[in-house]
Amino acid sequence: MYKTFGGVRYEMDTLVLSPKQVLEVLEDNPIAFNQFKRAKVNYNVAGVLGFTGGVLIGFPIGTAIAGGDPEWGLAAGGVGLILASIPFNRAYKGRAFGAIELYNKKEMSRVKPTFHFYGTQAKLVVRF
C-alpha cells in the first residue's frame, strides 16, 4: 500500500489492485479482512460525498460560464460536502493501512516505536 496525493495505491507482485481486489486477497486473514471491510465503507462514503460535492460546485460554475444567474448556495453546500468527506477519507487510509499491516504480518513484536520530527520538535510514538 502506497499513500499518494489523492488517496492510496495497492500493489501486489507488481500488479496494481483495486480496493475490491484487495478485499478478495485479504479473505485469508479474517481480522485483516474485517478491518479492511470497515475501511471500504469509509471509502464508499467519502466517494459519494466528494462526488456529490463536486457536482454541486459544478452546476453554479457551469451556469456562470453560460451567462446565467448562478446559485452560489449550491456551491457552498458542495464545499461543505467535500469538507465532510475528508474525515471519512482519513479513516479509510488509516484502517486500510492497519489491515494491510496485519495481512503482511510486519509487526513481529507488539511494541512499535516511531519517531516524528516537527521542525525543532520531536515526538516518540509507541503503539501496542
Image (cartoon, helix red, strand yellow):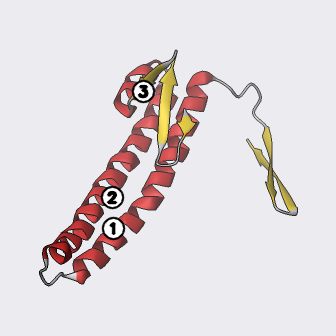
What distance separates the C-alpha of mark 3 from that of mark 2? Answer: 22 Å
At x 27% / y 69%, what residue is drawn? Answer: 57
Which corner quadrant of the image does residue 39 belong to? top left
Q: Secondary structure at mark 1?
A: helix
Near mark 1 (Cα within 10 A), the count class, few <14, some 14-19 or many ≥20, is many
At x 38% / y 30%, what residue is drawn? Answer: 18
**Which disc is residue 50 wearing?**
2
Counting from the top left corner in percent of width and height, residue 36 is at: 45, 36
Judge from the rendering whether residue 108 lies leftward or rightward of residue 27; answer left or right.
right
What distance separates the C-alpha of mark 1 from that of mark 2? Answer: 6 Å
Compare marks 3 and 2 and give the one earlier in the sequence: 3
Which corner quadrant of the image does residue 97 belong to? top right
**Which disc is residue 22 wearing?**
3
In the picture shown, does residue 48 fall above or below 67? Answer: above
Which corner quadrant of the image does residue 53 belong to? bottom left
Counting from the top left corner in percent of width and height, residue 73 is at: 24, 82
Near mark 3 (Cα within 10 A), the count class, few <14, some 14-19 or many ≥20, is some
Counting from the top left corner in percent of width and height, residue 83 is at: 41, 67
Amino acid on which the number 3 mark rests in the picture: Val
At x 31% / y 78%, what residue is drawn? Answer: 76
Instruction: Answer whether labels 3 and 1 touch (C-beta < 8 Å).
Output: no
Q: Residue furthest top?
A: 13
